[in-house]
Image (tube, helix red, strand yellow):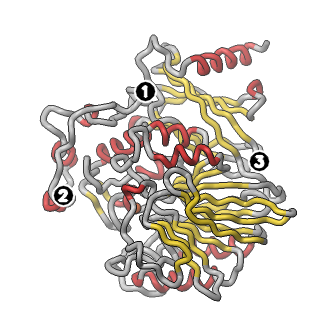
């Protein structure tokens, strides 16, 4: 046996026996692995080193704030003052329930095609970056399409220390544009740590494990900075909220072995309906983008992308916050959510694609309907009607484009008679998070309406060699509550 192979088998057996080296006191992979932006030949892998193997199981409660206190604190910008305000006397953030603080150390990543572990590739030992919440990431390139890859991560404090933790994961790359095979995917939106429906995390992740999807998309509002316990008025508090959510076992397990596309929205950049120029406590919009796009999730140069998933399916992941006009501007042809460059790219790539089925995933609705009053944040609102009309008119020229979105906390299917316009709102990630629409307000364009939590499951299958697209709305336990089928 070659020495490298012997070492690898040793490390593999170590990881199979026990992830954690009982003789060491870390660092650990308490936040698991995230991947992002997968295409046929590349993927980005993210991880973080932690002081604890899991989130802190218990601790004191945060000090609650009145609405008036919140509204005045969000206008302050002194991080020390803002950090201290919600903590009980004598406590630090690390003492609070769920805390999973970061630590310094080094990570080595090995990856190989499933079934041929001896053909592994590996990174060097790489230090995590304390300035980026102790995270580290790599872009893996030269991958094979339609291939399952296994990951093995090793942690150590420094070159003199033993391996303190190991973690296994996996992902699958998309098939090329000539390959016909069934593909399934799930779409999720809007959840947070406090409104999880089990101690271990959100039930949708247990349900989605059984679906064995090829990939998963989170449309954003993965966590809510502007919800209590604590309101995240500072970078430290924002990091705390991610650390706590990422340590939840149901999420952590699912994300470690599912090809994922993580989008962001207002609440995980700053606060409700955030746009360029908004601040929340000590954090401005630019820093909010950076924390999400560079520190907490797999990074890409551009945060919009189209990915072919075989001959019959192509998806478009849109960026809905970075390039937008201020929500408060008067609507006009210049007012935008997508920005000119992204919009041109979207129109051009939709036109050029020969995929049978084209799925556009937008954080927020393009068709709606949205709440009748007080919303000026998305393409279905009056405040962005000009660009919304432009998008709807363009999309209506195709009979094979399907819109999917998050952001709204109810599940719906919208279709306007005599058009090609279809929109599937996946709804919030738990029942506790659902609301915002009167369940009895079933409008003519509603094919389906349900004010409860769950997720959306999409699948492309074949019947007599002809592609069939199914969208199923699922409840939080994975039961199908509605299905729409399209034959091609
Ligand atoms: Fe939301």
How packed mark 1 is, by other alpha carbons closer than 10 Å (few <14, some 14-19, many 20 or more), is: many
Q: Is residue 78 visible?
A: yes
- Relative to residue 223, is residue 354 drawn left or right? right
Comes first in the chain, label 1 or label 3? 1
Q: Quadrant of ligand 1?
A: bottom left
Classify the position of the N terminus by image quarter: top right
How packed mark 3 is, by other alpha carbons closer than 10 Å (few <14, some 14-19, many 20 or more), is: some
Comes first in the chain, label 2 or label 3? 2
371, above or below 116, in the image: below
Q: Is residue 286 visible?
A: no
Q: Residue at x 44, y 14 (%)?
A: 24
- The foreground one among 429 and 87 is 429
Residues under numbered marks 2 and 3 in contact, where contact means CB atoms less than 8 Å apart? no
Relative image position of residue 303 (x, y in whole percent): 54, 59
Q: Which residue is identified by label 3?
A: 145
Image quadrant assignment for residue 122:
top right
Relative image position of residue 331 (x, y in whole percent): 41, 85
Q: Which residue is identified by label 2?
A: 70
Residues under numbered marks 1 and 2 in contact, where contact means CB atoms less than 8 Å apart? no
Image quadrant assignment for residue 275:
bottom left
Helix or strand or loop: what does disc 1 sit on? Answer: loop
Between the residue at mark 1 and the residue at mark 2, the CA separation in whole angstroms equals 33 Å
Q: Residue at x 80, y 60 (%)?
A: 462
278, above or below 205, in the image: below
Relative image position of residue 452 (x, y in whole percent): 44, 62
How packed mark 2 is, by other alpha carbons closer than 10 Å (few <14, some 14-19, many 20 or more), is: some
Mark 3 C-beta to ligand 1 under 8 Å: no
Instruction: Point out which mark residue 340 bears.
Output: none
Q: Which residue is identified by label 1?
A: 53
> Which of label 1 and label 3 is nearer to you?
1
């Amino acid at each position: 046996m070659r020495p490298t192979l012997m070492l690898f088998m040793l490390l593999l057996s170590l990881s199979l026996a026990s992830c954690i080296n009982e003789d060491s006191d870390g660092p650990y992979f308490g936040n698991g692995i995230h991947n992002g932006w997968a295409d046929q030949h590349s993927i980005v892998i993210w991880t973080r080193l932690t002081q604890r193997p899991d989130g802190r199981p218990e601790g004191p409660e945060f000090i609650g704030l009145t609405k008036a206190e919140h509204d005045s604190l969000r206008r302050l910008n002194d991080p020390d003052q803002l950090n201290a305000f919600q903590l009980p006397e004598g406590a630090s953030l690390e003492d609070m329930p769920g805390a999973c603080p970061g630590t310094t150390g080094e990570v080595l990543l090995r990856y190989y095609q499933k079934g041929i572990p001896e053909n592994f590739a590996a990174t060097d030992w790489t230090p995590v970056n304390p300035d980026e919440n102790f995270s580290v990431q790599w872009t893996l390139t030269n991958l094979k399409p339609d291939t399952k890859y296994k990951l093995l991560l090793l942690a150590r404090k420094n070159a003199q220390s033993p391996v303190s933790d190991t973690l296994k994961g996996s992902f699958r790359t998309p098939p090329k544009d000539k390959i016909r095979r069934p593909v399934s995917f799930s779409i999720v939106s809007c959840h947070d740590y406090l409104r999880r429906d089990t101690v271990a995390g959100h039930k949708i992740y247990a349900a989605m494990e059984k679906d064995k999807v090829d990939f998963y998309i989170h449309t954003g509002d993965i966590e809510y900075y502007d919800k209590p316990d604590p309101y995240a008025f500072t970078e430290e508090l924002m990091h705390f909220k991610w650390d706590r959510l990422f340590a939840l076992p149901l999420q952590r397990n699912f994300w470690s072995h599912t090809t994922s596309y993580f989008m962001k929205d207002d609440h995980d950049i700053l606060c409700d309906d955030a746009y360029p120029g908004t601040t929340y406590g000590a954090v401005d919009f630019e820093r909010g983008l950076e924390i999400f796009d560079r520190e907490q999730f797999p990074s890409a140069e551009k945060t919009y992308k189209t990915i072919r998933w075989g001959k019959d399916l192509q998806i478009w992941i849109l960026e809905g916050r970075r390039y937008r006009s201020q929500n408060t501007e008067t609507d006009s042809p210049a007012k935008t959510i997508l920005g000119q460059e992204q919009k041109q790219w979207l129109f051009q790539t939709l036109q050029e694609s020969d995929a049978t089925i084209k799925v556009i995933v937008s954080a927020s609705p393009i068709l709606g309907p949205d709440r009748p009053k007080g919303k000026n944040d998305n393409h279905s609102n009056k405040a962005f009607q000009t660009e919304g009309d432009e998008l709807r008119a363009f999309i209506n020229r195709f009979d094979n484009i399907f819109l999917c979105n998050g952001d709204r906390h109810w599940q719906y299917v919208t279709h306007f008679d005599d058009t090609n316009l279809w929109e599937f709102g996946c709804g919030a990630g738990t029942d506790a998070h659902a609301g915002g629409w009167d369940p009895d307000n079933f409008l003519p364009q509603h094919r389906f309406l349900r004010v409860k939590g769950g997720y959306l499951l999409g699948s492309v299958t074949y019947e007599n060699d002809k592609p069939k697209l199914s969208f199923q709305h699922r409840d939080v336990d994975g039961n199908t509550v509605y299905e729409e089928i399209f034959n091609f």
